[in-house]
Amino acid sequence: MSDSEDMTEFASIVERIERGEVPIKNIERELICPICKELFTHPLILPCQHSVCHKCVRELLMLNHDDSFDAGSECSLPGSPRSRVPSPSMERLDRLVRSATVRRSFGSRGRRGLRVLSSCSSSISSPGWRRGSVTPRVTTIPCPGCQHDIDLGERGISMLFRNFTLENIVERYRQAARAAVAIMCNICKPPNQQEATKSCMDCKASYCNECFKLHHPWGTPKAQHEYVGPTTNFRPKVLMCPEHEMEKVNMYCEVCKRPVCHLCKLGGSHANHKVTSMSSAYKILKEKLAKSIHYLISKEDQVRTQITELELLISQTEENGQLAERQANEHFERLFETLQERRSEMMRSIEQSRNRRMEQLRSQVEEYQGMLENSGLVGYAQEVLKETDQSCFVQTAKQLHVRIQKATDSLRTFHPAADTCFDEFVLDTSREETLLKEMCFGGVPDPPLIDLSQSKVYNEASICWRLADDHLPTDHHVLEYRRLVGPSQSPSKEDGEDGGLWRETDRVYGSNTIVNDLEPDSLYSFRVRSCRNSMFSPYSPEVAFHTPPAPVFGFLLSDKCGFSTERLVLNKRRDAVESVAGAAFLLAAERVQTGSYISLDYIIGDTGISQGRHYWVFKVEPHSYMVKVGVASDTKILEWFHNPRDTSSPRYDHDSGHDSGSEDACYEVSQPFILLTLGMGKLFIPKASSSTANPPASDPGNRVLPMPQRLGICLDYDSSRVFFYDADTMRCIYERQVDCSGTMFPAFGLMGSGKVQLEDFITAKRLTF
């Protein structure tokens, strides 16, 4: 298609719009600001090519800055709103915040609304700030259209162009909406105000014929002003460069996708960018727009068909939803009826048993009341005793004696006629309650299960879960957590009475997520559930994790300070070290016959500790022959690495690794190191001393424990104590005083075959998963 044909086609499209074949009222949603939800007013073009009202951008920035600031890109033009905008209403602010916070779903990451990042001066144009000021300003706002953060640079919205094309379209829309309402002359005064017939683009006012002649007389400069039909939209004649206010834009930057002036290209921010002439950019963009409009118009029938299909789907969705709601109500009604019937039967059984027992007890009461004097059986017997005729007395007393004897026996062996306990009527509904809680629709997914082997909890928690093999597709997952026990080993009371409440993370679209800002030395409970089509699955079984007692200490294994390359192998990531037997090890073993012993090969962390509390975790392979783990001062490490006696007699060193018994000695004075021995699947606790908080028994058998899968060490430098933990259960295995007079380093010693592996998060300089 030739250029002339393209332009002809584009002109025909414009004519269709002007003739009303494409009603302008149908484009109303394209003219609505995404922030204020009203027609655009002085719209500005953001770097992401979305448009926002000038006033709305200012209000976004005023949420965090109360000072007035420089107006927009047309600040030097009388048509631009330079004056300070009044404080927006609470409803308007809420709308702005809502539009800014609908961003980042968990991957989102959340919560995040609008962010205004600044250094020393973060307002757009704070009072007293000058364009030549050296104070840097970095202002970032979220685009309400694409939800991306937009960096406005140091000059803020002064760098943004006004969208004059959009302004004209909005003005034409307003004129079409108020076609019956005339634009009045701005010069005439009521009640004789006349209807305007012209609008001067230079004076930015509307005039009737008489006032226009009066204010634009022939032979004066005003007679050369540009005038158009009556309008309320006055815009500058020429688009000016926001960086160089006195220069017209005459080029188009293909990198930044915005108009620029020649000064921007010569030495400005676009000096190294590829630019093209404004006429070329105009022609190219106009051709692209014409082709796109032509394609949409040619597919109008297809769009109408799809709209019809969508409307049918909406109707079917509404009908099916109402049907499903009725069916669910019917099922619940049947459940209610069944429960009511069962309730009536069980209540009737209880009532019958109660009445029977009460009747039996009342009969027994009447029987015993007859034994009282002057009443019942006793009174009758007293009257019989008054009988003097022997034959008559014998005749009556025989039966009376039997009754009295029976009453006497019952009195001696008193037993209530009925049991007052109703234990057999206790109703256990726990199973039914569980079934009711788990009752769900057929399309609800099964609850996920938290994977204990993959989940880790430190300063942050990395929680992983898995679904059943035949699980239904899910839309997202929601993880909930709460703190059960705090550092004081008492129920958590965070922020008053809300400590035990469940807290919910954002939506998770994968099978794991991160929970931040966990309290140290606390017990947390986690649970997760899945969602599909707005229906949630039951919760997974709750899983409890204990956070470490101190912040995580990150380090790598050092390959410089005394590292033995002959007997130790350090991987490339420097997070694992392995002791291997080689020729040097064989020669050292040969010296055993001459009274020399094999020593430990030490390796330390590349980062030292000089203050605070720190915690790290590692694994020791179960097949390791002997590994010593702990902390040591810098002076002690130098002694280990440079003292030749380390290779001649380990008995000289209290903790050399040789099983001579010297390392089991008790020291009343704390040493500048402490090492715990592990090997062959066992952990060996040193002998008790006065500095040990939890002294083990003197029996050597009680000092041997199974080796934990993961071992944690906590160094409290300020209190000069070291704690060893089972990292899986956070149970303190051993603690001891240590001399922290120098810089302390994580230390590991290996003899024979063995391997130490640091946890992944330990090797990172900051906690990330």
Image (cartoon, rainbow, N blue to C red):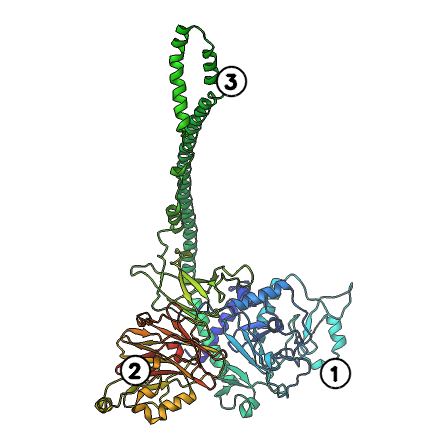
Along the line of sight, which residue is nearer the eye, 575 or 698? 698
**Which SS class for mark 2?**
loop
**Which SS class for mark 1?**
loop
Q: Are marks 2 and 1 in contact (CB under 8 Å)?
A: no
Along the line of sight, which residue is nearer the eye, 497 or 63? 497
Question: How many discs appear?
Answer: 3
Q: CA distance from mark 2 to mark 3?
A: 98 Å
Within 10 angstroms of label 3, few (less than 14), some, or many (20 or more) residues? few
> At which x and y percent is residue 565?
30, 90
Q: On screen, 212 above or below 480?
A: below
Residue sitting at x 47%, y 70%? 520
> At which x and y percent is residue 17?
52, 67
For the residues carrying marks 3 and 1, which lies nearer the camera in this image? Answer: 3
The residue carrying mark 1 is: 220
**Picture quadrant of residue 697:** bottom left
Within 10 angstroms of label 1, few (less than 14), some, or many (20 or more) residues? few
In the figure, is residue 137 to the left or right of 718? right
